[in-house]
Image (tube, rainbow, N blue to C red):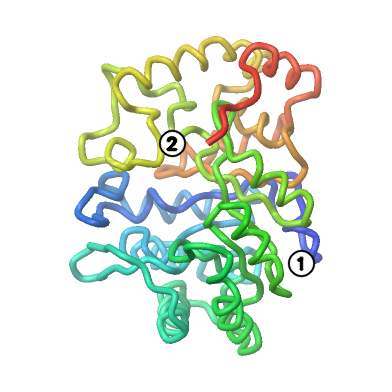
Amino acid sequence: MFQRDLGTRTGIQVSALGLGCWAIGGPWTFNGQPAGWGEVDDDESIRAIRRALELGVTLFDTADVYGCGHSERVLGRALAGRRDDVVIVTKVGNLFDEQTRTGGGNDLSPAYLRRACDASLRRLDTDRIDVYLIHDGIAGPEDVPAVIDVLEELVAAGKVRWYGSSISDPAIVRAMAEGPHMVAVEHELNVLRGEHETLSVAEELGLASLNRTPLAMGLLSGRYRPDALPAADDVRRNAPWWDFFDEGAMERWLERIAEARAELTADGRSLVQGALGWIWGHSPATLPLPGFRTVAQVQENVRAADHGPLPTERMERIRAILGEPLPI
């Protein structure tokens, strides 16, 4: 596994591939809608995380709301005895109830941020969060200074090392970057579509670009077709943030994948590995965070590092075929 900087402020490097831990949270709902990726086997999730550690993965991204605390708990169990070997990213801002596995609304008040941080530390079974991302709840740049004040308080207390934004609005990212310990922004990026302005801001300010949806919520795995969809209660078919599995849109996305498949897989990579190599080739700031539920998925994701970034000439050919990824 090759390494990349976690932004320019931290002075540390992490595995160029991280793992996104949304899917291992299991079923839950948010604002009355399914928000999980279906049933999970916690033992398999733990085996997958430990296999990732064996293969050199040192970056793990979760959120307190994923599975209403369950993802953090599973990740904490899996990392027992290896905590000092990894960088944990988690998120705060969305409200939820662990017992009912339901959530809705957001809160970034000082009192809530402090309570939520302590709760995440308990679930992760750790004494510090490496990168604490704001998940939701900032309407505009004017809301940022008060949030930074609390985050800096948590840094001073040793509970948080660095922080960042999972709210990808460029104006909010710039405002967050005024904070002394702001190091990362999480935003969408894949071969089909991406938040280009946010990536440009990350590059300009020396922030780590943490890439959600690197495999287009699984569409770039090659597993799904209009007659082979995720389950009806899967978040990928119920959330407003993407249309990868919507009738009509899915067919168009699959056509674009088919057009680029030969270039993505030309040197023996799987489609998944080509899609991850494209992200690495797009910018040296990028750190893709593919999700997983099984050991096999982790192994395929990690093997993308054997090939590394797509070479420049292949990037150019894919650009000629598809154009730039569609802006969000």
- For the point 32% across and 42% down, the residue is 239
Q: Label 2 amino acid?
A: Met
- For the point 62% across and 64% down, the residue is 87
Q: Which residue is mark 2?
A: 217
Q: Residues within 10 Å of mark 1 (few under 14, many from 20)?
A: some
Secondary structure state at the residue bearing disc 2 = helix
Left-right relation of 62 to 233: right
Tell me where residue 251 sits by quadrant: top left
Left-right relation of 303 to 248: right
Q: Which residue is mark 1?
A: 10
* Whether residue 163 is situated above or below residue 6 in the rendered picture: below
Q: Where residue 13 appears, x then y in whole percent?
A: 76, 58
| Front-lying residue, 243 or 8 | 243
- For the point 50% across and 50% down, the residue is 20
* Whether residue 40 is situated above or below residue 62 in the rendered picture: above
Left-right relation of 270 to 117: right
Left-right relation of 75 to 11: left
* Whether residue 228 is situated above or below residue 190 in the rendered picture: above
| Front-lying residue, 30 or 74 | 30
Q: Label 1 amino acid?
A: Thr
Secondary structure state at the residue bearing disc 1 = loop
Q: Where residue 1 appears, x then y in whole percent?
A: 71, 44
State the CA–CA distance, disc 2 to disc 1.
29 Å
Which sits earlier in the primary sequence, circle 2 or circle 1?
A: 1
Q: Where residue 6 appears, x then y in whole percent?
A: 72, 58
Q: Residues within 10 Å of mark 2 (few under 14, many from 20)?
A: some
Tell me where residue 84 sits by quadrant: bottom right
- For the point 35% across and 56% down, the residue is 25
Tell me the number on the disc at residue 295: none
